[in-house]
Image (spheres, rainbow, N blue to C red):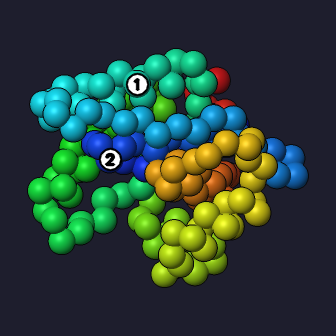
Amino acid sequence: MKVLGIDPGYEKLGIAIVEKGLKKELLLYSHCIKTKRGDDFEKRLLFLGEELENVIKIWRPDCVALETLYMHTNQKTGMGVAESRGVCTYIAAKHKLPIYSYTPIQIKETVAGYGRADKKQVSEMVLKTIDLPLKKREDDEFDAIAVALTSIYRDLSNLSTQLKRRY
């Protein structure tokens, strides 16, 4: 079973493909899709959608796990992230993939055992939980891995049932 974890954003979109292993989960791929600041917002969203679609075609995940929007003090940024998340949801639905959404607190509780864990604590637990190929990763990639792990740990039985119906 392969989960596409997504940390939504319009400047940087963290993605990770995590596979449920027998003893330990496996990271098959992670990346941070970056858009150009000077581009029109619509062009940035189109680029994100096209790149995400390519990842789905190449890796063929069984489901998509998305972090829900946490509204920061900057509402303009929050609205842009919400629109990016909408593009991700659309692309996943277009490919008929089950979509799971998790709040930042749910992700932190599941991965780090504490809903108020900081980014460093979450990253450390990700490193202990999953075999990561050596590569420098951005925070957005670690977040996407954590989102995928949350889906595996929380919704594994529901997902298995859905996949059996799908095939």
Residue at coordinates 58% horizontally, 39% vertically from top-left? 30
Report, in whole angstroms, how far the alpha carbon at label 2 lies from the one at label 1: 13 Å
Q: Quadrant of the N terminus?
A: top right
Q: What amino acid type is highlighted by mark number 1?
A: Glu
Q: Nearer the viewer, residue 15 or 97?
A: 15
Q: Badge 1: few (under 14), some or many (20 or more) residues near its Cα, within 10 Å? A: some
Tell me which residue sits at (36%, 58%) in the image: 68
Residue that numbered label 1 is attached to: 51
Residue 73 vs 4, above or below: the answer is: below
> Compared to 127, does 11 lie above or below?
above
Which of disc 1 and disc 2 is earlier in sequence?
2
Q: Amino acid at mark 2?
A: Gly
Nearer to us in this view, 99 or 67: 67
Q: Residue at position x 51%, y 69% from top?
A: 119
Specify the label residue 9 is tagged with: 2
Looking at the image, which is closer to me, 12 or 92?
A: 12
Where does residue 54 sit, x and y in percent of width and height? 46, 20
Residue displayed at 19% across by 26% down: 43
